Image (tube, rainbow, N blue to C red):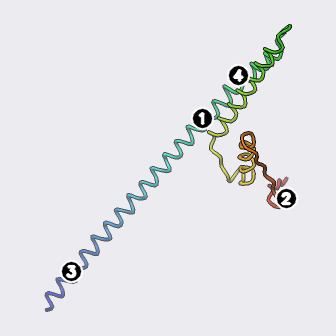
Amino acid sequence: MIIVSFILLAYRSFILRIIKEKNAQHEAEVLHQKRLVLENIKAQESERKRIAVMIHDDIGNRLNILSLWLNNLDTKGDELIKKNISAQMGSLIDSARSISHSLYPVNLESVGLVLYIEELIANLSGRINISLNVSPKFQKKIFS
């Protein structure tokens, strides 16, 4: 009876140790997966930031320069063409700005939720009839 009890206790101890090892291995795998996901997210945000900066700094600036050149052209009699080109340039500049802002990762901690929502509403207001009124108690206070 003592031997059987000893064998059962040893078996139980062995099973518990195996379960602990399996749990530890599973937790290590989950932690590793989380790290991989975070690294992937960081890489994606870095790439999105790079593309957004490139669009904003390169394409946006070039479009602004073209717009300035266009406004300085002497278009005797072709005001309609100039207006159409100016409208298209303005649209391209707005599109480049919109794309770069949508790609750039937003850090809510530095921007703040209210400013982020205000920006979102401003972007949507061109497509749908929407507005936002923020209570003064939720306005971001600037301290000097």
- Residue 48's place in the image compared with 22, above or below, is above
Q: Based on the displayed image, in which of its 4 quarters is residue 25 positioned?
A: bottom left
How far apart, in angstroms, are the residues tagged by discs 1 and 2? Answer: 35 Å
Q: Are the residues at dot 2 and dot 3 in contact (C-beta closer than 8 Å)?
A: no
Amino acid bearing label 2: Pro
User: Left or right of 134: which side holds 61?
Assistant: left
Q: Nearer the viewer, mark 3 or mark 4?
A: 4
User: Left or right of 34: which side holds 12?
Assistant: left
Q: Which residue is mark 1?
A: 50
Amino acid bearing label 4: Arg
Viewer-nearest residue: 66 or 3: 66
Amino acid bearing label 1: Arg
Q: Based on the displayed image, in which of its 4 quarters is residue 57 positioned?
A: top right
Mark 2 vs mark 3: which is more N-terminal?
3
How far apart, in angstroms, are the residues tagged by discs 3 and 4? Answer: 77 Å
The x, y position of residue 40, in whole percent, is 48, 45
Crowd rating for badge 3 (residues with CA inside 10 Å; few <14, some 14–19, many 20+) = few
Q: Which residue is mark 4?
A: 62
How far apart, in angstroms, are the residues tagged by discs 3 and 1? Answer: 60 Å
Mark 1 vs mark 2: which is more N-terminal?
1
Q: Residue furthest front?
A: 129
Viewer-nearest residue: 79 or 107: 79
At mark 4, the secondary structure is helix
Q: Are the residues at dot 3 and dot 4 in contact (C-beta closer than 8 Å)?
A: no
User: Left or right of 119: which side holds 16?
Assistant: left
At mark 2, the secondary structure is helix
Q: Are the residues at dot 3 and dot 1 in contact (C-beta closer than 8 Å)?
A: no
User: Left or right of 58: which side holds 42?
Assistant: left
**What residue do we see at 43% from left, 58% from top?**
31
